[in-house]
């Protein structure tokens, strides 16, 4: 992907030392190619890449990590609000998928894993309740008691 050139990068010379015209033949082209590649790398690493081109790259990958990196490197860019919004959408989606996995597994382990990562989640209370219910069920089963009373109603109000 080609990136836009930052205005402060336009006047940089690709080779400092001998003028390019003084180099001869294939060696000149080889050296010039190497120097240009090196300059492109240095300019990219030194921030001569615009927020716009970085944001286009972020959009093409569309993951939590790249949005976090973008916001860290461009905290005041014009794309900040859009990046924050999409980051939250992706985090919400991850949280929902983790809840779905935990509730489908319906095991103490799955709920503990969920709560460890999403302790303040909108699903956290449901996860804690399900975990307590499973502990209660296990305790009754260990004592050989039925979860249902003589009328067929679940004991304990679960």
Image (cartoon, helix red, strand yellow):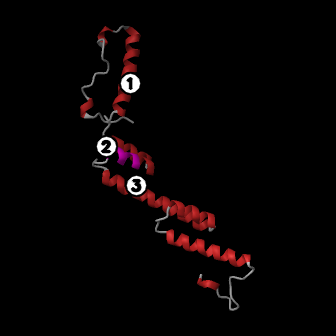
Q: Are marks 2 and 3 in contact (CB under 8 Å)?
A: no
The range drawn in magenta is: 67-74
Q: Categorize mark 3 by other alpha carbons within 10 Å: few (<14), some (14-19), many (20+).
A: many
Q: Is residue 111 visible?
A: yes
The residue singled out by tag 3 in the image is 87
Tell me the element at label 2. helix
Q: Give the mark nearest the N terminus, 3 or 1.
A: 1
Pinpoint residue 150: horizontal percent, then vertical percent: 71, 91
Residue placed at 33% from the left, 30% from the top?
Answer: 43
The residue singled out by tag 1 in the image is 38
The residue singled out by tag 2 in the image is 52
Tell me the element at label 1. helix
Q: Is residue 121 above or below residue 144?
A: above
Pinpoint residue 10: horizontal percent, then vertical percent: 25, 29
Q: Is residue 63 visible?
A: no
Q: Which mark is residue 154?
A: none
Q: Categorize mark 1 by other alpha carbons within 10 Å: few (<14), some (14-19), many (20+).
A: some
User: As drawn, is 57 to the left or to the right of 4?
Assistant: right
Magenta span contains residue 73: yes
Q: Categorize mark 2 by other alpha carbons within 10 Å: few (<14), some (14-19), many (20+).
A: some
Q: Is residue 93 above or below residue 77?
A: below
Magenta span contains residue 91: no
Quarter-of-image position of residue 26: top left
Name the mark nearer the viewer: 1 or 2.
Answer: 1
Pinpoint residue 80: horizontal percent, then vertical percent: 31, 51
Quarter-of-image position of residue 5: top left
Q: Is residue 69 above or below residue 87?
A: above
Q: Give the mark nearest the N terminus, 2 or 3.
A: 2
């Amino acid at each position: 992907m080609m990136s836009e050139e930052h205005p402060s990068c336009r006047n940089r010379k690709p080779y400092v030392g001998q003028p390019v015209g003084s180099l001869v033949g294939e060696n000149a082209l080889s050296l010039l190619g190497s120097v240009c590649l090196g300059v492109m790398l240095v300019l990219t690493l030194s921030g001569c890449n615009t927020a716009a081109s970085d944001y286009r790259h972020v959009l093409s990958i569309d993951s939590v990590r790249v949005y976090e990196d973008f916001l860290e490197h461009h905290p005041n860019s014009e794309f900040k609000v859009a990046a924050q919004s999409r980051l939250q959408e992706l985090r919400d989606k991850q949280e929902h998928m983790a809840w779905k996995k935990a509730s489908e597994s319906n095991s103490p382990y799955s709920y503990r894993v969920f709560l460890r990562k999403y302790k303040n989640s909108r699903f956290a209370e449901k996860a804690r309740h399900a975990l307590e219910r499973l502990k209660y069920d296990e305790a009754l089963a260990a004592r050989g008691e039925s979860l249902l009373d003589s009328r067929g109603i679940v004991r304990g109000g679960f």
